[in-house]
Image (cartoon, rainbow, N blue to C red):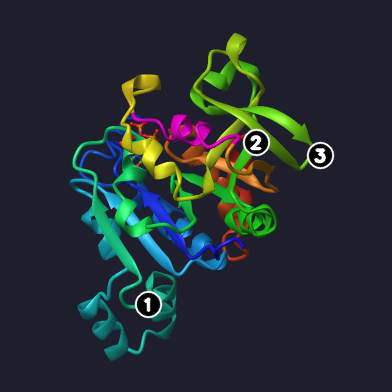
Amino acid sequence: MTKALRKAVFPVAGLGTRFLPATKATAKEMLPVVDKPLIQYAVEEARAAGIEQFCMVTGRGKTALVEHFDVAYELEATLRERDKQDAMQLLAGTQVEPGSMVAVRQQVPLGLGHAIWCARAFIGADPFAILLPDDLVLADRPCLSQLAEVHAETGGNVIAVTEVERAHTSRYGIVDPGADDGRMVEVKGLVEKPAPEKAPSTLSIIGRYILTAEVLPHLARMERGAGNEVQLTDAMARLIGSQPFHALRYEGRRFDCGDKAGFLEAQIAFALKRPDLAPAVRDFLRRYV
Ligand code: UTP
């Protein structure tokens, strides 16, 4: 029987070099889209999918990420004193069950695979989700909930994928597809950042995964892959054949918020979904385009 999915890992120890100078002293995952930091979108998405235990893999200069989910005693006391109910309400999404969130350190950013390996004690022998907060997904049904539904059916490993232009395959992990029903694809192989002419497809992995703990011994080998980093994609590829492995063409739109243009587009897309902001945003956009 498939074990219930209750754990999620949030790797947030990257350097965010594509977003310098903003990320010099601030974590990329604390950058807000409209009025909420990226990390909060990810934690809320996980919670909506039934996740009860959260693990952040952090690095130096990233303490704000953990503090965002702590009690802000002075702030909350002042808001209460001034009877600012609306402002108090805005903090609701930052509250987590006592003891449900832990942080581990990745002292040196050796790659996403290494970051996940740093969470091995938290993961134990359980299936777990991974959410990369800089991949923000706008969807009617949260992306991780879509994956969790597939996972409950198939067990094993499930990753979210989307089509990209062939010219861009060298930016992503790419799936070598097997049986494909148009929504779900059997994963026959995985390649990290292949050149366009070598890519087995144009189906790229986005930052949402549900994996089994069996990926950990493969990560422990610390083999370096593309970019000389310990790649999660390479460790996942070693699971193929011994466990079910599926890719889901999720419904929704992904924004790469680690990239400046992607981040700006996310601001617009998310603001246009907000009834309190959409009319003003639509109005000023007309003046620019
Ligand atoms: P990215 O590829 O976006 O790398 O990592 P980055 O360092 O954050 O940003 P750039 O490319 O330098 O601009 C994808 C995810 O994996 C995490 C990042 O925090 C991000 O959520 N990561 C990456 C780690 O936690 N540790 C690493 O060693 C590398």
181 left or right of 240? right
Mark 2 / mark 3, whichever is N-terminal: 2
Could you tell me residue 31's position as x and y percent? 37, 49
* Image quadrant in which the C terminus is located: top right
Q: Is residue 103 magenta?
A: no
Q: Which residues are magenta?
A: 230-241
The residue where tag 1 is placed is: 97
Q: How much space separates mark 1 and mark 2, taking CA atoms?
A: 33 Å
Question: Considering the numbered disc 1 on the image, is that residue within a helix, a strand or a loop?
Answer: loop
Residue 162 circle label: 2
234 within the magenta span: yes
Q: In the image, what residue occupies the spot 42% across and 37% down?
A: 258
Q: Nearer the viewer, residue 3 or 260?
A: 3
Q: Is residue 168 left or right of residue 97?
A: right
Assign a secondary structure to mark 2: strand
Residue at 33 percent of width and 24 percent of height: 224
Q: Residue at x 60, y 48 (%)?
A: 269
Above/below status of 35 relative to 136: below
